[in-house]
Amino acid sequence: MVAITAVSTPVRVRAKFFFEGDQKFFVKGVTYGPFAPDAEGEHFGDPIKAAKDFALMKEAGINLVRIYYVPPKWFLDICQEYGVRALISIPWAEHLQFLKDRKIRREAEKAVAEGVRKNAGHPAIFGYLVGNEIPSTMVRWLGARQVTEFVEHLINIGRSEDPNVLFSYASYPPTEYLLPQNIDFTTFNVYLHSQTDFEKYLARLQNLAEDKPLILGEFGMDTIRHPEEEQAEMLRWHVESVVRGGLAGTIIYAWTDEWFRGGQEIMDWAFGLVRRDRTKKLAYDTVKELFAGEGSMVRRVKLPSYPKVSVIVCSYNGAKTLEPCLESLKELEYPDYEVILVDDGSKDNTQEIAAKHPWIVNIKQVNKGLSVARNVGGMAATGEIIAYTDSDCMADPDWLYFMVGTLLSGDFGGVGGPNISPPAANWIQACVSAAPGGPSHVLLTDVVAEHIPGCNMAFYKWAFEKVGGFDPEYRKAGDDVDFCWRLQQEGQVIAFSPSAIVWHYRRFTLDAFRKQQEGYGEAESLLRFKHLVFFGPTGTAKWKGQIYGAPRFTWLVNRPIIYHGIFGEGLFQSIYPTPQSEIAAYLSSVEWVVLTVFIFGLSIPLPVLRIVPYLMFGGTFLVALSFMIHAKLEPRHDTIRARLLVAFLALAQPLVRGWARYFTWLKFKRTPTAVIASPEENFTPVRGSISKMNFWSENGAGRERILPEIIDALEKEGWSYSIDTGWKDWDVQVYGSFWWGIKLRTVTEYHGGPKCLTRVHLSTHMVATTVLLNAVLLSILAYRQILNPGGDVLLWGPYFILLMLLFWRARRLKKRVADLVGAAAQRCGFLRIGKNR
């Protein structure tokens, strides 16, 4: 006898999953009906027959029925009695041009309002679908944006009648671009009988769903045209693929072969788990095996293997959120893992919290920065896989299941997942969470990532060792970006697992948000010198990939492209969002704002320029305004003041980040004056060019010998420099001062046997501060000359003196570097010559 638990607790959405209280609720559903109408016009049969159906459903572990008409109360009472929830589709004239006919539109609005109002508050109701498979040709006829907005309007109507249930729209592949933003969960009807194609499409749908739960609204096989054995086997792999793909559930089409549609019984289709007489098909037993009984679905659907995972948490003064982080890791649904806490010199009560968790490996070190902490954790790991999260994150119970499952599903070296903000405690937190600049992932395809955030990533230990771990130069941020790029340059592929989520606390205050963006700006500055090819002129990263789906269709700027197929009849009509606007990035950059201020200064005495800075700032303001309009704020914090704050943060964020990039460059990308002023030890300079030097060797040594010697000297003496990463035409770039840098290039000629001639070329180049200073001074002098021709000639004198001083500093820097090269060549046994031999 199957135990029956009546429905009582409502189901709620938390990121990609449903929860019933504190437990995950996986939708194990079937479609039910419609049946021939009774005397009252209801399409649900009679209560006695329904009760027998529900008894069989409960035996099979089914917890939800999808129905296609608004039900009578007796039907919902039976649902509640048997512990089965109802997902109600509200029918209306979707096949007609409803947006061009006011009467049809009003009837649709009335159908939704009255349909929700009829049973409002009934505990058996899971939610409503306000539409189902609007024909793709009709959407193309009416316009995708207009149809999307109308569906959103219907959801708002339904939610006003009953705000305590969930709402969605049932889409299908021909209209995958219909993505209402106010749905509680994403629903797609998908009929794909190839497991490989099915799993690929699930990955796409997961990315379109973004951070909302994804369920399949219909999936099944007709047993008139296919054997019952094939139906049973297909439903087995279907459920397994749905679980491993991280969906929040699936609805099997259908419960029974009995089906009434279009005013008649449908006799030539047989999709049911049971026949018309309610005898069980093989598929019923298969579904029962997968659905019935205790335990979560991830325990029922096994992974191919369960390699040991070492979860590493790096923390610096993270005590405020460390306790919930460790508690979440303790509850992971994974059989073989360890947790390693690396306390990077915290000054708060991190160690007190760690002492409450003797089950973790606790490593304490002096503060050395995030990258070193991650490397220490990696070296201490005993697992085959190393997973990283932060002390301000909480992991979903199935986090490792999805991470490892994705990693094992292909030839991947690493994997990452999304990080999602928990509900905000106040309106400021909500604004910070909605503001641009937070950690995120970048996708090249539906399953391959270009970048995964450091708070949610995992790698095979061999991949970690292959690239030498994390670069210690990155103390605050940027280490994850650098690691991903280096791993990909080694030929490895990084996967993305959309349901392997961690809850990531965003910064609690505006000041904390500012410090975070300063840290990101510092990291971008360091990354730019190491991976220059990945950065644009303003110093911001240029990603090759993008996240599929748009937060909101922006039909005027960056309009997404939709493939409808010929005459709008495509079976899979895909949306292709355009890349992020480079124009918007320029208009909001610190360089653009500085130029705006500069031109504003020039416009004071030159009225003809006065309109220019206002137009320039107008462009910057429009970018911030766009963020304000399209920001995804939590409904309870979505107020006018909140959106104004988001606009301010969108305006300030790139400025803070940009300034930090330049400040980092000024701070770190220059060599101390004392180093430049110090002569080379045990070296006597010889006369000759300091730009072109030739070194002779008769022992077969060339540039491969002198370059490491030069780099070793730069490192020991304390110079600031960068080495070619494969994308430059120079070998070493030396950062001298605020004004000048040196580029060093080498080539070796082979003159027979061991005789080699190595040429070294040093070229001086201006840095941004030199260009900016000269541009400002020349503008001022030109302005004075225009206002007073010939009257300010004496002002040019100090400018030429300044130029002479700058060129003297450039020559001094080049000579110092030339001496360093000469000393390195001397140690290599090279002989400097004045001309070719």
Image (cartoon, rainbow, N blue to C red):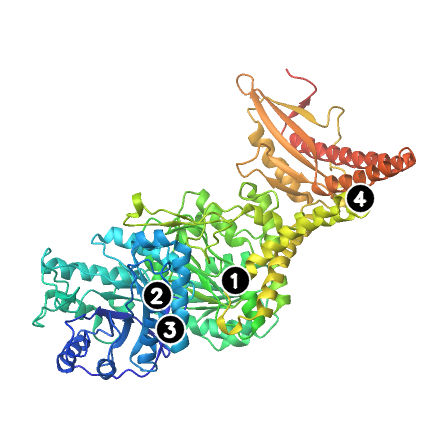
As measured in the structure, the alpha-carbon distance from the residue carrying label 3 to the one carrying label 1 is: 23 Å
Residue density around tag 2, few if under 14, some if 14–19, many if 20 or more, within 10 Å? few
Q: Is residue 477 left or right of residue 36?
A: right
Can residue 183 be seen at all in this image of the molecule?
Answer: no
Q: Which of the two marks, 4 or 2, is nearer to us in this view?
A: 2
Which residue in the structure is indicated by mark 2? Answer: 103
In the image, residue 25 lies at what x, y percent?
Answer: 32, 73
Which residue in the structure is indicated by mark 3? Answer: 158
In the image, residue 213 lies at what x, y percent?
Answer: 36, 66
Which residue in the structure is indicated by mark 1? Answer: 631
Three-letter code for the amino acid on which mark 1 is drawn: Ala
Residue density around tag 3, few if under 14, some if 14–19, many if 20 or more, within 10 Å? many
Which residue in the structure is indicated by mark 4? Answer: 606
The quadrant of the picture occupied by the N terminus is bottom left
Helix, strand or loop at disc 4? loop
> What residue is shown at x 77% (from left), y 33% (from top)?
811
The image shows a total of numbered marks equal to 4
- Seen from the viewer's position, the closer of residues 37 and 784 is 37
Mark sitting earlier along the chain (4/2): 2
Mark sitting earlier along the chain (1/4): 4
Where is 177 relative to 679, above or below? below
Helix, strand or loop at disc 1? loop
Contact check, label 3 and label 1, Cβ < 8 Å: no
